[in-house]
């Protein structure tokens, strides 16, 4: 599905789930290299930047922690950046692009947008919107971390083991998706210096700055998660140790009582109290007294 947006001399073509016919149409209209056209027909594994005579071809992957439309943990977006046109290609719905298209249409109608005089500026504003969306995704993870923190100190350490593991997986997937963004944007900066005018260099550096905002936010969350995991593990260990201590003390208290009971259970004609009318109660009293003495012995030694 092709959507085309125009503003002044700039054209943005957004292509979702491209077909062979749609790609062929774009190749003819914008003089796209056949190798690029072939790559547009299916997702690629690695991000990259290629500089051609009339455009820059750039591939990036973006994580989708909570807004996935196809069940996958990342979305690929291909950018073809010419002098006065920008082509974006993706293989499922990308929310930031959809939101930007609405803003682009409104600004075009009102004629109040300052998009610059070439498509590099349009690419910059789209990428800024993409990174803003990633920041919002991380804000959702921040809320999860705060919820985990509250539950940890509310005594739900056991339940939080899985929650911490799930959140850690989300952060790992997020980091894996943006792992190559820095290298790709730096390569794009070099290509952009040759392709666009010198004054656009500021926007190229600002784009890398947008990436670092997301990266630093991700690293802060990773550190917070590590601290929460250590705290949770420490509380779980302390609780387990206290339980084991209580069970051990109970076992040591019951052991002498069991020993006394076993003595009176021996078959012998010479055991005292066994054959007396109230022997049962006297034996039970002895067992209880032994247990009480052991209990207070532990209290005296501050084992309890």
Image: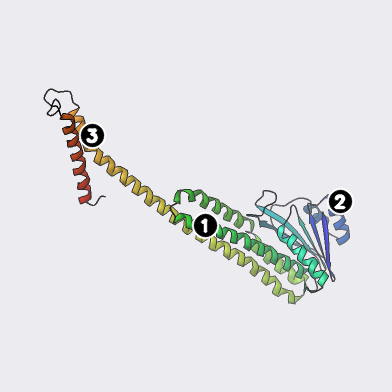
Mark nearer the N terminus (2 vs 3) = 2
Instruction: Tell me, for residue 147, which label it has, or none.
Output: 1
Crowd rating for badge 3 (residues with CA inside 10 Å; few <14, some 14–19, many 20+): few
Q: Is residue 276 above or below residue 73?
A: above
Secondary structure of the residue carrying numbered label 3: helix
Where's residue 261, x and y in %? Answer: 21, 32
Instruction: Tell me, for residue 21, which label it has, or none.
Output: 2
| For the residues bearing labels 3 and 1, Cβ distance under 8 angstroms | no
Instruction: Tell me, for residue 293, which label it has, or none.
Output: none
Mark nearer the N terminus (3 vs 1) = 1
What coloring was used for the rendering?
rainbow
Residue beneath the point at 11% across and 25% down? 270
Q: Quadrant of residue 125?
A: bottom right
Of 255 and 73, the residue lying toward us: 255
Measured in 3D between alpha carbons, the distance from the residue under mark 2 to the one under mark 1, in whole angstroms, is: 49 Å
Of 260 and 31, the residue lying toward us: 260
Where's residue 41, x and y in %? Answer: 79, 51
Crowd rating for badge 1 (residues with CA inside 10 Å; few <14, some 14–19, many 20+): few
User: Is residue 187 among what the camera can see?
Assistant: no
| For the residues bearing labels 2 and 1, Cβ distance under 8 angstroms | no
Residue beneath the point at 80% across and 55% down? 35
Single out the residue that lies furthest toward the front: 277
Horizontal arrangement in the rendering, residue 7 relative to residue 172 (left or right): right
Q: Quadrant of residue 76?
A: bottom right
Residue for badge 3: 258
Secondary structure of the residue carrying numbered label 1: helix
Measured in 3D between alpha carbons, the distance from the residue under mark 3 to the one under mark 1, in whole angstroms, is: 48 Å
Crowd rating for badge 2 (residues with CA inside 10 Å; few <14, some 14–19, many 20+): few
Residue beneath the point at 82% across and 50% down? 19
């Amino acid at each position: 599905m092709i959507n085309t947006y125009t503003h002044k001399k700039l054209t943005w073509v957004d292509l979702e789930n491209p077909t062979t016919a749609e790609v062929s149409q774009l190749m003819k209209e914008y003089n796209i290299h056949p190798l690029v056209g072939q790559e547009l027909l299916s997702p690629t594994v690695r991000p990259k930047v290629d500089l051609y005579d009339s455009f820059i071809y750039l591939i990036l992957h973006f994580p989708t922690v909570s807004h996935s439309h196809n069940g996958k943990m990342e979305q690929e977006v291909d950018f073809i950046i010419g002098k006065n046109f920008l082509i974006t290609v993706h293989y499922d719905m990308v929310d930031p692009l959809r939101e930007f298209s609405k803003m682009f249409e409104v600004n075009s109608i009102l004629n109040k947008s300052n998009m610059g005089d070439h498509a590099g500026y349009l690419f910059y504003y789209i990428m800024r919107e993409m990174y803003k969306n990633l920041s919002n995704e991380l804000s959702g993870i921040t809320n999860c971390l705060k919820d985990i923190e509250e539950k940890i100190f509310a005594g739900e350490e056991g339940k939080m083991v899985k929650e911490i593991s799930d959140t850690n997986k989300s952060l790992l997937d997020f980091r894996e998706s943006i792992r190559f963004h820095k290298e790709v944007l730096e390569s794009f900066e070099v290509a952009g210096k040759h392709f666009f005018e010198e004054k656009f260099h500021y926007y190229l550096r600002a784009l890398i700055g947008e990436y670092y905002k997301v990266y630093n936010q991700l690293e802060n969350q990773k550190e917070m998660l590590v601290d929460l995991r250590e705290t949770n593990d420490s509380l779980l260990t302390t609780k387990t140790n206290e339980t084991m201590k209580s069970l051990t003390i109970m076992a040591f208290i019951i052991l002498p009582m069991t020993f006394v009971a076993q003595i009176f259970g021996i078959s012998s004609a010479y055991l005292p109290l066994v054959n007396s009318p109230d022997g049962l109660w006297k034996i039970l009293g002895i067992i209880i007294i032994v247990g009480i003495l052991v209990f207070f012995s532990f209290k005296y030694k501050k084992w309890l």
